[in-house]
Every structure is written in structure tokens, then in C-alpha cells.
Image: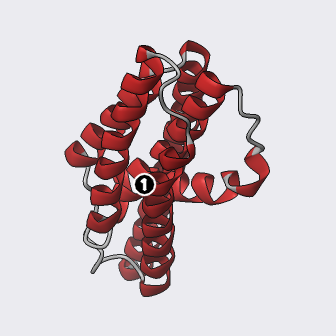
Amino acid sequence: MTDVAEDHTKEQSSLYSESLVVATSVFLFVLVEKLIDRSNDVGGWANIALVGFSAGICLALRGPKASVVSQPTNIIIRVIAIMLGIYVLVSPLSFPSGESAYADSLLIASRVAAFVSVTFSFFSIRYPTFVIVPCVSVLASKAIGTDLFDIGISPTDYIPIVEIGLFWGLGFAC
């Protein structure tokens, strides 16, 4: 009789901890989305700072190693991270330069952020949490393009992939 009671207690404990992780990742996801919206309202350098902030968070909360995560999840996270990292590296090349000193300095900073993003995307092979940085970098790059050059960029082509990467990365950070 005590074995059944212990199993039931373990199941309740496991369900509680899983529920806590899900609730925490949803809370962090909403918080990050609000920070991104706020940085888009401020514009420019706030987006670059958000990339640096996300890199700091990833280094502080590395989460589990890839060997602990299931193989299909690892594959999806790696593909998302590397794809978005390369995209962020290439996308600032399409922005015009020579518009103003402010625009040029912001473009240089976005290229540096792109190299940081690529670095973190390859480190996501070891730590899946690092997928957060390429995701935030894509959002920052789009916001900088919209802010500087009034380029209307539709979010329908890229936002689902970015949100999946953010949600999983934040979930692993918990």
C-alpha cells in the first residue's frame, strides 16, 4: 500500500514541477515579447542592446546540454538557430549605407550583433538555450530596417520560426 502512495506522490510532484516549468517559460516568453515590443518603440540602439542582453541571459542560464534533450528537438533547434544566424548575418548587407552617421553606426553595430548571433547559433549545438540570441537578432534586424529606412517588413514570413525558437530556448532556460 505504501508503494502505491509513494508512486502517486512522485507523479503529483512530477506534474507540479512540469507545470511550473511550463508556466515559467510562458511567463518569460511574454516578458521577452514585451521587451522586444518596447525596444521597437524606442528604436535603434535599444534593439542592439536587446541582443546583448539576450546573450548575457543565455550565458547565465545555459540550461541543459544537448545530450539531455531529445534528438528530434535538438535537430529542430539546431536548424532554427543556424538558419536564423546565417539570415541575420546576410540581412544587414541589403540595407543602404551612407544615409547618415547615425544609420551607419547602427548598421555597423547590427553587423557586430550578427556575428554574435552566428556564434551563439553554432553554440546552440551544445546548449539549446542559445537559440534565443539568433531569434532576438532577427527581430532586432527587422526592427532596425523598419526604423532606419521605413522598409515595411511583413512578420508573416519569419515570425512563427522565431517564436518557436524563443519559446523552446526560454523553456530550456528554466
Residue depicted at x 42% and y 82%: 70
Residue type at the position of mark 1: Leu
Residue sitting nearer the eye, 38 or 15: 38
Q: Position of residue 68 (x, y in %)?
A: 30, 77
Q: Quadrant of the N terminus?
A: bottom left
Q: Position of residue 44 (x, y in %)?
A: 49, 21
From the viewer's perspective, is residue 13 above or below residue 74?
above
Do we see residue 115 in this rendering?
A: yes
Label 1 sits on a secondary structure element that is helix
Do we see residue 50 in this rendering?
A: no
* Residue labelled with disc 1: 89
Q: Residue furthest bottom?
A: 71
Q: Residue furthest left?
A: 60
Q: Position of residue 3 (x, y in %)?
A: 37, 81
Residue sitting nearer the eye, 82 or 102: 102
From the viewer's perspective, is residue 78 above or below residue 53?
below
**In this rendering, would 60 be left or right of 143?**
left
From the viewer's perspective, is residue 149 above or below residue 29?
above
Q: Position of residue 169 (x, y in %)?
A: 44, 56
